Image (cartoon, rainbow, N blue to C red):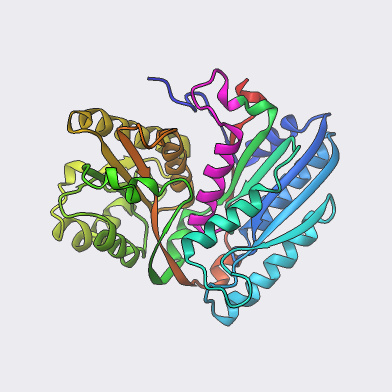
Amino acid sequence: MRTLWEQYVFRRGSDANELWERLFEDRPIRLLYIAGSGFDVRAQTVMRECINSIRSSGGSIEEAKLVLIDFPNYQLGDALKQLTEQNDHGLAELFSSIGTVERITFGSGDGDEDLSATIALRIGTHAVLEKVSTQTDIILDASSLPRVVYLALMTSLLNKLVPDKDADNALAAAGVNFQVLVAEDAGLDGQIMAEDPSSEIVMVPGFSGAMQVESFQDRPLVWFPILGEHRVNQLQIIRSTEIPGEAEICPVLPHPSRNPRRADRLLVEYKEALFNSRQTPTSNILYVHESQPFEAYRQLLGAMRRYTESMEILGGCRLVVTPLGSKLITLGAGLACFEMRPPNLETALHGVAIPHAEPTRYDVDPQAVRSSEPEVCCLLLTGDAYA
């Protein structure tokens, strides 16, 4: 069975610069750039490299707009608040040399209106999608965005650009080049503490029906928790509220990894939450490549397809993915979920859900963020490369 990204375009480091220069070379450019106004200043590294490559490509910028997303509901210490302000100003200043800047706020209602996290995420995602019009290029920078936000934006943009996944050359997307950029530093990602997770489960837009539609409630559930450091509390909330005791659990671990002991340490960290309390067999563990998102996509997609086929005799199943790992693995998981999501849930034998216990407070040493030396990674998901 074919996959959407059987052939893919993924570049890192100086190879990303070379890709950009060829991609933007000597043509008109109408650019929509989406980034987060968070504390992760790695986003400035990504934007700086990308803008420099656009300038050196010889392309003509007809229009360029930066959508900068604010998150007022997150609790940060004074040092991280200051870092957030610096990052916001830095991104706006960088982009203003080629285009305009517009801000969108995620997570706040009008006046005293109290929105649920899922509704706020849906409203914010829709506000970003409304900015998509006649662009030739769309760039989503995940570097300074919470994982539930960049997953929602990536899958929603793909759904808009690729309405028929079964069509020939579906990823050509009428020539719109959609890129996801990441400043990768898995070591720093592991140091970021996600504290005080909300008891409210957030559902990524388009991936909630499998958990909410009545006809799916009696179907077997297969859970793929993607494990990352310091996320046990989030996992326990999802496990206790969304995952039935008889569910099949397939933990996803990073291997190969730059830290060869990372998978072993995660097994120890999640021993009680997954393996002791739920008696998950170690044979169910799925290993995915830490630094190759398309390989992670293929491995997870293959596992999801195998479970779907084997449970067809039982009337179908629910596939649930909980992304708690580093950015590149999370992006690969998001691509697998996008491909597995059926076009019509009412007639489908399987459904896909992405529940997330969103933290309300983040903590990390600001100096560790400033001193990070990330590698810029580029995933080209649609466009002429796939025609």
Quarter-of-image position of residue 9: top right
Assign the C terminus to one quadrant of the image: top right
Is 335 on the left or on the right of 251, as rendered? right
Quarter-of-image position of residue 357: bottom left
**Does the magenta segment cover residue 94?**
no
Percent position (x, y) of residue 11? 59, 36
Percent position (x, y) of residue 278? 15, 56
Assign the N terminus to one quadrant of the image: top left
Q: Residue at x 78, y 54 (%)?
A: 95
In depth, the one of 217 and 138 nearer the eye is 217
| Depicted 7 relative to depicted 184: above or below | above
In depth, the one of 209 and 19 nearer the eye is 209
Determine if residue 260 is in view: no
Q: Which residues are magenta?
A: 145-171
Is 213 on the left or on the right of 13, as rendered? left
| Most distant residue in the bottom direction | 78
Q: Residue at x 68, y 48 (%)?
A: 130
| Depicted 269 relative to depicted 26: above or below | below
In depth, the one of 63 and 8 nearer the eye is 63
Is 288 on the left or on the right of 156, as rendered? left
